[in-house]
Image (cartoon, helix red, strand yellow):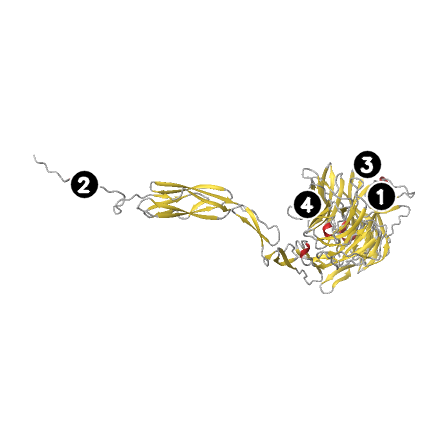
Amino acid sequence: MFRARAPWWLLVLLLLGGCRCGDDSDLGGANASFRPQETVVDFGRVLEGTQVRRSLTLVATGRSGVEVAAVTESPFFVVVSQIVVPGSGTGTVDILFSAGSTPVAGALVLTAGRTTATVKLTGVGVRPLACLPQGECRESRFDLDSGQCIESPLADGASCIPGSRCQENGRCQAGVCVGQPRTCNDDNPCTVDSCSPTQGCVTASVQCPVPRDPCKVGVCDRNEGCKQVDAANFTPCGAVSCKEAQVCFSGTCRSVTPPDGFVCAPATPCQGEGTCSAGECMRPDAGDLVALFSAELGGEPVAEDGGPVLLVDDGTVYASVCGGDAGCRLAAYTENGLLRFESPYEDGGARTLLAASDAGVVVLAPEALEAYAPRGTGALRWRTSLGFSDASPDGGVSEGVPGTGAGRVALTVEGDVLTSVTWSGDAPDAGTVGEPLRSRLVLLSADGGSPLALGPEEDGGGAARLAVDDTRGAYLYTPWDGRLAFASWETASVDAGSGLDGGPGLTSFGPSALADGGLSALVLEPLDAGVSGGAPSLALASGQLLVGARAFVDKDGGVPVALDWDGGLRTLSPLAEPVLVTPGGSVGHAFARACERTDGTPCPGEELRTVMRSFSFDDGHALYEVDVLPSPVLPGTLYEAALMEFGTVSVLADAELPGGQRQAWLEWISSGRKVGMCALPGRGQVAGAVFAGEVVHVALERDGVWRLESYAVGQRAETRGWPQRHAGPSGTRRTVP
């Protein structure tokens, strides 16, 4: 039987014609897929808060195009989430990294159909350091790779900010920012214009001289300047009692008989005012003072004998404290008792306060002066050795141990530090000071503590006293030889080659300059009026000096007017501090120990009294004398006194109670009599106090804890003249006209 068969090649054609490879008949067969070119995308180190873009290539694995979906999570982001990859070609997915401050890792998920690929994403967020240049005319930038600050100098002529706000339009010159002096004159004769290195231009109202006539007051007129006008009627001009009162009428002091209801005693923070009734001054009962705040000091306040325990400047109360875990430190409080900062001393040793200004808080360290910033954390601004051997005019080294202290340091209006330094021989015993060998007057810059001017080395030394008059210069009293000398200051340029931190226009004293590189010389001009046998004491107001607690001297010299310290049957021993001089310079207040014994034997402590005498500048006679101790029978201690507005003197003193406890009192004295007394609450040992504004700040120990407390005074502390120990609450020993 015949069976027909198809050719073999026909079978092959049929098989090929029925096969369809791939998804697209037009391509003749191709797979639609992709793959990422990299499995990891590393963004590296990126600054916090910035974004970095990276690109990832996707490769098609067939001749067919494919659409890929890209997904990731924060802090990574895709710019476009759908990427088309052409057949046999490539596509790009852009990824962003938004950096934080830590290393991170994430994943980029890529999907097309049933194909999924995952790419690892990594990046390191870097928080930059706060890069501050360490000096003028330098810039500091953060280097991302190293993670460190890199500093480089600015080119000459580059703009810069001078370190002193008394200069402006600074330009870099050889690595130093040199500015032009700032002009602060506002062309108003009723303002005092000055420049502070830290605050810039500072303006204060002119304090016109206080007339000697108590029924006249000084006022400033823009067109006429300072002039005198009549005081308000009924202004007290002398003693006031309910029998007779000295009051002003139409500019004349008159004696009147006060009517009932006449105010015979002012109100105090613990007692209402007194009024006249049937010729007697009647007052309500007094209570205890109430503290405005009481804060723990955290240690014992440190001060030298006669030096400030507390300082107040620009709303800040300063104390040098030792004790507790923090060792010794500078503590700063607001006037409301809140701690601003505690700045530990580098070696942990004790320091004593000297003066404060907006340029810094000056303290005495062993054989050195230090200044601490009054703001921020109270960081150490500078430290200057008292040796000054590198600034000696003759190139030699001063032998002995250098020292200075309270009363021997004063500040100019710019904050420059004027100090009298004494070199003493080796001390015979530990804790004592050797015999003075020589002394020298030195001026240091406010901003860096570098020497600006030096006086000549002189034989002898000791507890000298300084007083600064902004309008004239400085006065120096040396009790060991009774000399009173004057040094004026003027602007002198400092040679940049001297190695000092200064620049043009630095304040210095005296007209001459040394040959060792622009350092000025302090030239002392002795006045023809000396005061021998005086205490280490000097006060200045309206051109009148109270020297050694012994005599008045005019600013230009002349014959000293001796103070009348005749005690009659008593022995009076004047105290060096405090001494106060009224703004007009017409009256001085000084204090003395009084002993009733006349046989020459010393008084025991329980018999000693402390009195305040008020003296007339005209002839030195005693106007008043008041026992300032709170109790007429109990012994006590005077701690501080200050002039208040309208001529009142406020006194902080205590009484030693039976059993050894002590009670502190705040007292007010006017026209030779006590017009009020307020007891501080509780019992405590006072270390020191300072009057500022309408309060008194007191450092005292209660129940074994040292505290800073504040009390209302009821009157505003005087700021003119020489109203307090060291001239004011900041200890600058600078008089205000």
* Dot 1 and dot 4 residues touching (CB under 8 Å): no
Q: Position of residue 638 (x, y in %)?
A: 80, 44
Disc 3 to disc 2, C-alpha distance: 134 Å
Name the amino acid, label 3.
Answer: Pro
User: What kind of element bears circle 1?
Assistant: strand
Q: Position of residue 214 (x, y in %)?
A: 80, 57
Callout 2 crowding tier (Cα within 10 Å): few <14, some 14–19, many ≥20? few
* Dot 4 and dot 3 residues touching (CB under 8 Å): no
User: What kind of element bears circle 3?
Assistant: loop
Q: Residue furthest left?
A: 1
Q: Which mark is residue 658?
A: 3
Kindly identify which residue carries mark 2: 12
Q: Which mark is residue 609?
A: 1
Labels 1 and 3: the sequence-earlier one: 1
> From the viewer's perspective, is the residue at label 4 or at label 3 nearer?
4
Kindly identify which residue carries mark 4: 332
Labels 3 and 2: the sequence-earlier one: 2
Callout 4 crowding tier (Cα within 10 Å): few <14, some 14–19, many ≥20? many
Name the amino acid, label 4.
Answer: Ala
> From the viewer's perspective, is the residue at label 1 or at label 2 nearer?
2
> Which quadrant would the N terminus be assigned to in this image?
top left
Labels 1 and 2: the sequence-earlier one: 2
Disc 1 to disc 4, C-alpha distance: 35 Å
Callout 3 crowding tier (Cα within 10 Å): few <14, some 14–19, many ≥20? few
Name the amino acid, label 2.
Answer: Val
Is residue 252 placed above or below 360 in the rendered structure?
below
Disc 1 to disc 3, C-alpha distance: 17 Å
Is residue 456 placed above or below 125 in the rendered structure?
below
User: What kind of element bears circle 2?
Assistant: helix
> From the viewer's perspective, is the residue at label 3 or at label 2 nearer?
2
* Dot 3 and dot 2 residues touching (CB under 8 Å): no
